[in-house]
Image (cartoon, rainbow, N blue to C red):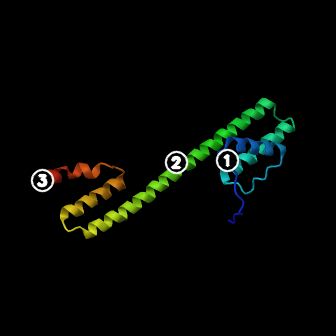
Amino acid sequence: MKRNDKTLPDFKDPDIWNGLKKQCYDGGLIYNDFPADEYKYFDRLRTVYLEYQANVFSKSEAAEHERLLLREYQQSKQTAARSLEVYREYQTNIKRLNGLRIEINKAQTVEGKLRAALEIVGIVTGDGDFANRNLKGIDEND
């Protein structure tokens, strides 16, 4: 997919967002290069505006459709943000796992190897306290 060097509007700025909606209503908004969520929103909003202008929708019906489109857009953005956060955590865990594998290989004692291995198990199972719980007996013997 080829992307133009055009800078995108700041969709989070309310003034810019309202200006884009006005351009959409007037039919002058070119949203072909917008990201998927924004493209979908403005494409569907343009349809609502055209139906309002053609008297298919009353003003209140058009406003309700616009409100529903905005809610759907915001939910999509929230889902994408959550997905990005999960992906970042996944990548962080991969880096931690690789570091712990190196620790296991370099460890000179069984306890050193065990500590790193238990941390790996905790990461893989999503149990951040796994290593601490299982090292209690070992730490007490030190």
Image quadrant in which you'd find residue 118:
bottom left
In this rendering, the label closer to the viewer, 2 or 1: 1
Q: Which residue is drawn at 19% across and 61% down?
A: 111
Q: Which residue lies furthest to the right in this view?
A: 54
Q: Which residue is drawn at 69% across and 35% down?
A: 67
Q: Do the residues labelled 2 and 3 touch (CB within 8 Å)?
A: no
For label 1, the residue is: 11
For label 3, the residue is: 141
Viewer-side residue, 124 vs 3: 3
Split into 4 quadrants, where in the image is the C terminus?
A: bottom left
**In what element is the residue under mark 3?**
helix
Kind of residue sitting beneath label 2: Arg
Q: Distance between the residues labelled 2 and 3?
A: 43 Å
Horizontal side of 106 relative to 73 (left or right) equals left
Q: Please, is residue 50 above or below residue 117 in the view? A: above
For label 2, the residue is: 82
Q: Distance between the residues labelled 1 and 3?
A: 58 Å
Q: Please, is residue 27 above or below residue 6 in the view? A: above
Viewer-side residue, 112 vs 125: 112
In this rendering, the label closer to the viewer, 1 or 3: 1
Q: Which label's residue is closer to the chain start, 2 or 1?
A: 1
Horizontal side of 138 relative to 49 (left or right) equals left
**In what element is the residue under mark 1?**
loop
* Residue 55 percent coordinates (x, y): 86, 35
**In what element is the residue under mark 2?**
helix
* Residue 27 percent coordinates (x, y): 83, 47
**Label 3 neighbourhood size at 10 Å, few (<14), some (14-19), many (20+)?**
few
Kind of residue sitting beneath label 1: Phe
Kind of residue sitting beneath label 3: Asn
Q: Residue at x 81, y 42 (%)?
A: 25
